[in-house]
Image (cartoon, helix red, strand yellow):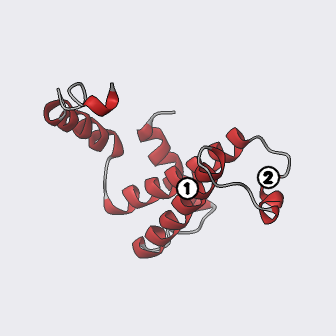
Amino acid sequence: MTIQEAQQNVDTWIKTTGVRYFNELTNLGILMEEVGELSRLMVRIYGEQSFKESDAPALKGESTNKLLEDEMADVLWVLICLANQTGINLTEALQKNFEKKNVRDAERHQNNEKLK
């Protein structure tokens, strides 16, 4: 699925099954919530923080990759909703972002001693 197809599929789902988009501010709050959930998992899987007993229901025998996949998809879903609501074509936005990084960061990271 391309980014453009994802934007269209989310829009179709929202307008049929979801009834309508939540307003932009509500979706921004939901995005922050979903990023927080992803962050919580990342710091427990890759960081130094351990899972708590109360995390057990969230794990439900799922692999950590499956949990991360689900949380990343939630983040992407809400980001796509916001793009659709604000008229942003994410394919074009990402292409422009690559162009910006290719100019601004052409040598920046190669010359970063911290990355060697």
Residue 30: mark in rendering: none
Give the tally of numbered discs. 2
Residue 39: mark in rendering: 1
Residue 112: percent from left, percent from top: 24, 31
Quadrant containing the C terminus is: top left
Please determine whether, in this image, residue 95 is positioned above or below residue 12. Answer: above
Q: Residues within 10 Å of mark 2 (few under 14, many from 20)?
A: few
Q: Amino acid at mark 2?
A: Leu
Left or right position of 109 against 37: left
Left or right position of 55 against 18: right
Please determine whether, in this image, residue 29 is positioned above or below residue 2. Answer: below
SS at badge 1 = helix
Viewer-nearest residue: 115 or 74: 115
Q: Choose the circle earlier in sequence order: 2 or 1.
A: 1
Q: Residues within 10 Å of mark 1 (few under 14, many from 20)?
A: some
Please determine whether, in this image, residue 70 is positioned above or below residue 91. Answer: below
Left or right position of 97 against 18: left
x 68%, y 39%: residue: 65
Residue 45: percent from left, percent from top: 65, 46
Viewer-nearest residue: 72 or 20: 72
Left or right position of 109 against 29: left
x 31%, y 53%: residue: 88
Residue 94: percent from left, percent from top: 31, 40
Q: Amino acid at mark 1?
A: Ser
Residue 59: mark in rendering: 2
Residue 27: percent from left, percent from top: 47, 68
x 64%, y 55%: residue: 49
SS at badge 2 = helix
Whether pointer 2 and pointer 1 mark residues with C-beta atoms closer than 8 Å, the reply is no
The reply to whether residue 15 is visible in this rendering is no
The reply to whether residue 84 is visible in this rendering is yes
Viewer-nearest residue: 32 or 54: 54
